[in-house]
Structures are given as structure tokens and as C-alpha cells.
Image: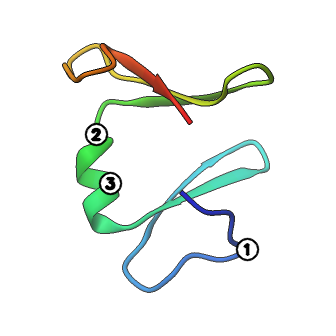
Amino acid sequence: MDIVKDAFSGDSTIEQDDFKVFLDPQANAMLMDTTIDFNDMQGFVLNNLQQSSSCGSSCSC
């Protein structure tokens, strides 16, 4: 994860209000059906109830 001003060639762009998220093709496939939220205590929180992983259905970074 990185903060950038513009998308790179091949990236998908998701826009909500004035906030944009750029996803490269590999990340786009991995994050399908995932919600991304930001929490002041945890940072970015990724939730995917369909995905099972070592951190359950959500992870924060």
C-alpha cells in the first residue's frame, strides 16, 4: 500500500466523494468484495466476510 497522486498504467480507480483508491490488477483481484475503511485507532481496515485468512475476516494496516 502506498499513497500516490495519480494511477499508474493498468490501475483500476475507485472513487468515493473526493477520495480515490488506485488498484493494480493483482490487488484488484485479491480485494474483490472487500470493503476498505479508515479508523483513527487501527489505520486502514480491510473487511471481507467471504475471505478466510490468518487474521479472520478483517485485517488492519
Q: Amino acid at mark 3?
A: Asn
Q: Which mark is residue 31?
A: none
**Residue at x 68%, y 71% (from the top left corner):** 4
Check the image and name the residue furthest to the bottom. 9
Q: Amino acid at mark 2?
A: Met
**Residue at x 75%, y 42% (from the top left corner):** 17
Q: Residue under label 3, please give it.
A: 28
Q: Tell me residue 8's x, y (percent).
A: 50, 82
Q: Establish if 45 lies above or below 18.
A: above
**Residue at x 26%, y 62% (from the top left corner):** 26
Q: Is residue 27 left or right of residue 17?
A: left
**Residue at x 33%, y 42% (from the top left corner):** 31
Q: Which mark is residue 32?
A: 2
Q: Are marks 2 and 3 in contact (CB under 8 Å)?
A: yes
Per the model, the C-alpha gap separating discs 3 and 1 is 18 Å
User: How many numbered markers are drawn?
Assistant: 3
Q: What secondary structure is marked by label 1?
A: loop
Q: Quadrant of the C terminus?
A: top right
Neighbours of disc 3 within 10 Å: few (<14), some (14-19), many (20+): some
Q: What secondary structure is marked by label 2?
A: loop
Q: Are marks 1 and 2 in contact (CB under 8 Å)?
A: no
Q: Nearer the viewer, residue 19 or 54?
A: 54
Q: Residue under label 1, please give it.
A: 5
Q: Are marks 3 and 1 in contact (CB under 8 Å)?
A: no
Query: Where, by quadrant of the figure, is residue 55 drawn?
Result: top left
Q: Nearer the viewer, residue 14 or 23?
A: 23
Q: Amino acid at mark 1?
A: Lys
Q: What secondary structure is marked by label 3?
A: helix
Q: Is residue 38 left or right of residue 46?
A: right
- Give the mark nearer the N terminus: 3 vs 1: 1
